[in-house]
Amino acid sequence: MKKYIILILAVALLIPSVSNAQRWKRYRYEVMAGLGTVNLFSDYGGGAGDARHNTLDFDIQGTRPALLVGGRYKLKELLSVKANVVFAFANASDKYTSNVPRSNRMGTSNTFMIEPSVQFEYSLIKEMYGRRYTFSNIRRFNITHVNTYIFVGVGGLLYFPSKTIEIDNDINKSHGVFTAAFPIGIGFKYAINRVYTFGVELGNRFTTSDYLDGHSDKYSTANDSYLFLLFTVSKRLRTSRKGLPRF
């Protein structure tokens, strides 16, 4: 008799686990939108040192707005592919830097950016489903239940810089308005309710251009990069029997 009781209890405990493990297949698709910020690392502007073209040259005064729209599809429980477009209005200005040679130069640029990209996300902490793992049950919130993922991808960047001053040591004033962009970063996501989720993403973009600010210093040895901090809201879409999303 005891054996049957133990077996029944084991099955009762196992069924919810199996159900939760398969629940991600019901919600393979998501659509999303978000707002955030962009910081440009180029020849203009930056921190106290020489231009570094990376996050070490961060200056909060150069922060400007960004807008995202996109969608996500779960290939596996821990692996997703995401396609999105980010619109941003970046700024790079020597008036913000405390580096004397750059501040004396007084160059400023505003760049409108459009970045379409495809990214692959791998979850270090898998996404949880059910009312228990939502903000509506915040008293049971656990940081270990926050979907945490890293991502890499490839995309393109359309950029349209406008300079307020011409610099004598600009090595090439004739340049294109398109470059390859390579996103890499980390993201966090937690459910608002059973349908909507809230996310935060921090991602750097490496490019193949040194002209995102419309300028390339003759002493420059690196391409420009930029950083997005994005806050998103996603809507989960049920997967139909044919594998298509139900809007």
Image (cartoon, rainbow, N blue to C red):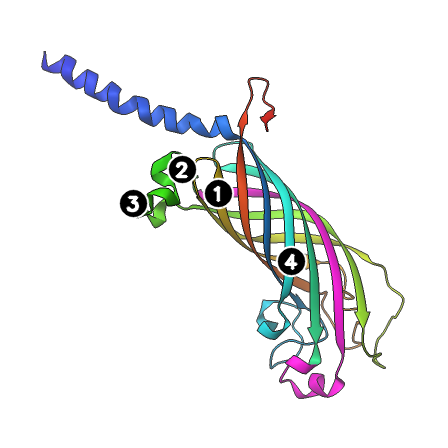
Look at label 2 and name its amino acid.
Answer: Met
What is the magenta range? 95-124
Drawn side of residue 158 relative to residue 172, left or right:
left
Q: Which residue is disc 1 drawn over?
A: 197
* Residue drawn at the location 65% of the way across and 45% of the way down: 84
Nearer to us of marks 2 and 3 is 3
Drawn side of residue 98 relative to residue 218, left or right:
left
Look at label 3 and name its amino acid.
Answer: Arg
79 falls in the magenta region: no
Q: Quick check: can you spot residue 83?
A: yes
Q: Secondary structure beneath disc 1?
A: strand
Mark closest to the chain's N terminus, 2 or 3: 2
Mark closest to the chain's N terminus, 2 or 1: 2
Gap between marks 1 and 3, in whole Å? 17 Å
Q: Which residue is disc 3 drawn over?
A: 140
Q: Are marks 1 and 3 in contact (CB under 8 Å)?
A: no
* Residue drawn at the location 71% of the way across and 58% of the way down: 207
Q: Secondary structure beneath disc 3?
A: helix
Mark closest to the chain's N terminus, 1 or 3: 3
Q: Which residue is disc 4 drawn over?
A: 66
Q: Secondary structure beneath disc 4?
A: strand
Q: Are marks 4 and 3 in contact (CB under 8 Å)?
A: no
Rendered location of residue 178, percent (x, y): 80, 55
Q: Quick check: can you spot residue 59?
A: no
Q: Secondary structure beneath disc 2?
A: loop
Tell me if mark 3 has few (under 14), some (14-19) or many (20+) residues whose alpha carbon lies within 10 angstroms of its own: few
Q: Which residue is disc 2 drawn over?
A: 128
Look at label 4 and name its amino acid.
Answer: Ala
Where on the picture, by quarter, is residue 175? bottom right
Q: Which mark is residue 142?
A: none
